[in-house]
Amino acid sequence: MSEENAAPDTPVPGVEPYDGPAGGWGALRAVAVAVRDQMGASANTRALFSMNQPTGFDCPGCAWPDPHKTSSFEFCENGAKAVTWEATAKRVEPDFFARHSAKELESWSDHALEDAGRLTHPLRYDAASGHFVPIEWDEAFSRIGAGLRALDHPDQAEFYTSGRASNEAAFLYQLFARAFGTNNFPDCSNMCHEATSVGLPQSIGVGKGTVTLEDFDLADAIFCIGHNPGTNHPRMLSTLSAAARRGVPIVVANPMRERGLERFKSPQHPSEMLSPASTQLASAYHLVKVGGDSAMLKGMMKALFAMDAEDLARGGKGVLDRAFIAEHTQGIEALQADVEATGWEDIVHGSGLTRAAIESMAQTYARAERVILCYGMGITQHAHGTANVHQLANLLLLRGNMGKPGAGICPLRGHSNVQGDRTVGITEIPEEAMLARLDARFGITSPRAHGHAAVESLQAMRDGRSKAVICLGGNLAVAMPDPDACFEAFRKLDLAVSIVTKFNRTCLQVAKETIILPCLGRTELDVQAGGDQWVTVEDSMSMVHASRGMLQPASPDLKSEPAILAGIAKATLPEVAIDWDWLIADYDRIRDAIEAVYPDFRDFNRRVRQKGGFRLTVGASHRVWNTPTGKAQFIAHPLDELSLHPGLLLTTIRSHDQYNTTIYGLNDRYRGITGRRDVVFAHEDDLAAHGLAHGDKVDISAGPGRVLRGYTVVAHAIARGSLAAYYPEANNLVPLEDHDRQSGTPSYKSLRVTMARSVDESLVPAG
């Protein structure tokens, strides 16, 4: 099968290759369908034109920065889906739950549960009737407070945070939990970019990207490794398109061919839409094997060291930036020894790429004076995710591609404020200096012991060591690996609280006391005692800016996230002398408190009112290395055992009609899938080796009890030895214990599996 072909000609229901570019008329049609299906004739459609504008609200989807340069509107297809999903005209009122029991709702798909519409009233689960029933806010707060106070110890509670929460909500949340007495802060970063938050500080002294949007205008080469911008951060396509048009090489390494890395037609530019042509993005596209990134990166560095030695032997100055290495780094000798001791045979086997392909990547890298390296969860969600991040940093440091214009590292954060939540205190391993400032500002004594991250939280819930969970957004039980264990963990709890805009499957995992609190969305007006309020978010390039909703709330009974957290805090901690009502009456007061605790937010309220906001300090962007030695570190790693695995490795992926666990629909346009999600993508040669063909039914097994049964196998342009299936359906293949030991990030992206023709279990004799 040619790499250019999406699938053979054999017809399979719901599978047909898509020939269009990313974006284009397909994106416009998808936006129109989303608006029609969710908003109808509602005036809420005007919200799309306020998204990502200086006086509007921040997209509730991805964290790509807002340029405000050329377009009068700054939204993409999937951003529009996120807004229509939130600003839908559909409502889930109390009578919905009178008609549908919890047992019936368990049989609904994840898509159907959220597609029912916006929640309008607080709810609690009534075990006697098996239904969710309405509850007043004061009673809900009272029950939650009583449940938390009844715990034997504060560490029996888990405080989960979704990346959708604003800086103001996240700050109040961590203040409340620390005043309560715990540092148990599982959050969505634990499941996606925790390897970045752990690995980059060890390498360069900061757990954030070092580039700005303007650096892309100056780069001489861009490398895209382990991410799919067409689906997960589509506004990046405009940035890549601009770079491609000025001749910048864009080198892609990804297990699958993704249309959003191949070619793009901008729906926001009429001249492009009326032209039959589209912009070619990738100048080179390498199908690296699932789990093979570390081997590929070591191969690139091995080629660089060889090129450097050859150039020096000819009397040249070499290809490494020796002045930068001498002044700013440590550890080059150990790295070079490790890389040179790694044989090309292992590198080729581990990466799935030829030596020539890897050397060509190294040559492109060496020819460029300024290089940006972009990566996503294809790098981080492995048992060796932190090591992968170290290797990316190593590669950039070899040629001084850190802390200079047009160069640096660009981790692509998924959710719109996952980075900001971490910045304002959502962390299970807080620094002493931060805790001291928090305590001084609010007169509390924060706990110092490290708390639970996401995997540890679910393990504690599963094992009965934790008895309560509060979820500030998200769909935690579905997002985590091992759903059966996670669902059971929730059902064992004394108290489970979800603060959400829509009902989801986590809400159905009922504890002894289960309460659902509906909150305002990012698009909606937030009016408190002090008048109209607005919040702030931090994008993936450390820019902090305002977000102001403008739509009427979906229900008069909704409260903002800060107001909900204040209500819970007051009911739980009546003896703590924090005036929660005073804080939420005017969010400027919350921002003043953030400034007092986090010096980087100096003059917060003034600076965030400037157009575009302001950038937080990122030391490595200025060659200031906040490591113990004050220098950037080369960190060597041997090839991990997984990359040398001789069998099949499976990665989980998101469809184009999906954002995290939210399923907008059952289509995956760019991969040619329509109306279904029960598919697994495979290379045609791997199918042949297993006696299979495109369209066959297969079982994918990761061990006893971890099987996807009856999936349709789709021949696709994917690396040999690699499979891909949709998240979260494939989460049952991942045990909770399969995660990166340094960061705790689950191994969603590299699972040892077997593939065989599907067995009809009804025909298998018992025993």
Image (cartoon, rainbow, N blue to C red):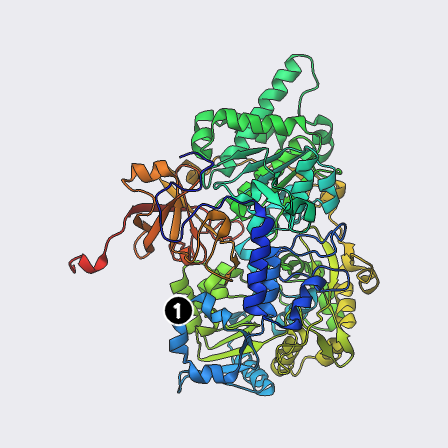
- Residue 469 seen in the figure: yes
Determine which quarter of the picture holds residue 389: top right
Which residue type carries mark 1? Glu
Does 125 sit above or below residue 365?
below
Asked whether, in this view, residue 552 is left or right of residue 100, the answer is: right
Residue 418 in percent (x, y) is at 62, 58
Asked whether, in this view, residue 195 is left or right of residue 13, the answer is: right
Does 240 sit above or below residue 339?
below
- Residue 161 seen in the figure: no
Q: Quadrant of the N terminus?
A: top left
Residue linked to disc 1: 488
Does 453 sit above or below residue 345?
below
Residue positioned most to the top: 314
Does 711 sit above or below residue 320?
below
Residue 752 in percent (x, y) is at 38, 45
Number of marks drawn:
1
**Along the viewing direction, whichever of 692 and 178 lies nearer the viewer:** 692
Residue placed at 65% from the left, 70% from the top? Answer: 44
Residue 199 in percent (x, y) is at 59, 46
Q: Residues within 10 Å of mark 1 (few under 14, many from 20)?
A: some
**Along the viewing direction, whichever of 124 and 493 lies nearer the viewer:** 124
Residue 766 in percent (x, y) is at 16, 60
Residue placed at 38% from the left, 46% from the top? Answer: 714
Q: Quadrant of the C terminus?
A: bottom left
Determine which quarter of the picture holds residue 536: bottom right
Q: Secondary structure at mark 1?
A: helix
Asked whether, in this view, residue 362 is left or right of residue 711, the answer is: right
Residue placed at 41% from the left, 80% from the top? Answer: 101
Residue placed at 69% from the left, 41% from the top? Answer: 242
**Along the viewing direction, whichever of 727 and 425 lies nearer the viewer:** 727
